[in-house]
Amino acid sequence: MMNLRLGFLASGGGSNLQAIIDACKNGRLKAECCVVISNNSKSKALKRGKSAGIPTAHLSTKTHSTNEQLDLAITEKLEEHKVNLVILAGYMKLLGPSTVAKFRNRILNIHPALLPRFSGKGFYGKNIHKSVLSSNEKFTGVTIHLVDEQYDHGPIIAQKRIAIMKEDTLESLEQRVLSHEHELYVNTLRQIASGEIDLGSIAL
Ligand code: GRF
């Protein structure tokens, strides 16, 4: 059993964040949502955090002049709120070395494809689904993985395969994948909370 204290980093819409907040509120997930950090002061994610009564922080290269200072500020903010599991939910920046080291094996990211495919430079947002559609794949999916110093890297914790339909458009595929993301993120966190998934035994 792990008493989860979640700290979120999000840049955009925050629908994954919302799914996790909702699961905590309705008791499906036993965890505390401790802080929402965003590099984008106008992000919907920050608004969602505020309306849920969760402490929020805008930390970016606007609030901190160097990447090193920003990295330290993020580490400190997470520590201030006694976070023990960091949830990247549509965070568009690379986490700095201080945060990665301080929370090694304790940072999760979600990726809207079946890693290691469709990842790396340029593979974010709609670009991912566009490439998947034009590759004539039969399946796409969702991946949750531990975060290390590289984008979309680190051991895979959970994956869900999703069939691509003939009539899928960029929008329909994006929406379907996103709703699976919400489910997989909540379910994976439930498994971590219950001890079914032991992050401590997974070495980076
Ligand atoms: C999701 O597709 C996630 O996989 C990717 O960024 C998107 C974030 O969506 N990393 P949201 O902000 O949670 O709505």
Image (cartoon, rainbow, N blue to C red):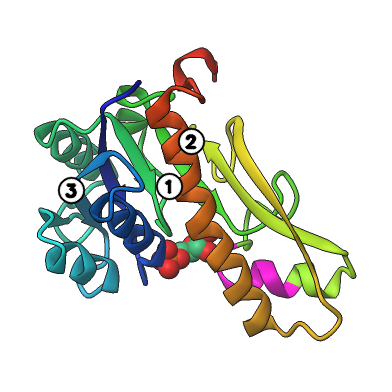
Packing grade of label 3 (10 A; few <14, some 14-19, many >=20) is: many
Q: Earlier in the sequence, mark 3 or mark 2?
A: 3
**Three-letter amino acid code of the residue under disc 3:** Val
Instruction: Please identify the quadrant where the C terminus is shown.
Output: top right
Classified by dominant secondary structure, the portion drawn in magenta counts as: helix
Mark whose residue sits in front, 1 or 3: 3
Query: Tag 2's secondary structure?
Result: loop
Q: Is residue 126 left or right of residue 166?
A: left
Work out whether residue 125 can be spotted.
yes
Q: Earlier in the sequence, mark 1 or mark 2?
A: 1
Q: Which residue is mark 3?
A: 35
Q: CA distance from mark 1 to mark 2?
A: 10 Å
- What label does residue 200 carry, if any? none
Q: Earlier in the sequence, mark 1 or mark 3?
A: 3
Q: Residue at x 43, y 47 (%)?
A: 94
Q: Which residue is mark 1?
A: 94
Q: Residue at x 19, y 62 (%)?
A: 49
Q: Is residue 107 left or right of residue 122?
A: left
Q: Quadrant of residue 68?
A: top left
Q: Residue at x 44, y 24 (%)?
A: 105
Q: Which residue is mark 2?
A: 147
Q: Position of residue 140 (x, y in %)?
A: 75, 60
Task: Give the number of marks.
Answer: 3
When the figure is inspected, residue 174 is found, relative to residue 203, above or below; the finding is below
C-beta proximity under 8 Å, tags 3 and 2: no
Q: Quadrant of residue 179?
A: bottom right
**Three-letter amino acid code of the residue under disc 1:** Leu
Q: CA distance from mark 1 to mark 3?
A: 19 Å
Q: CA distance from mark 3 to mark 2?
A: 19 Å
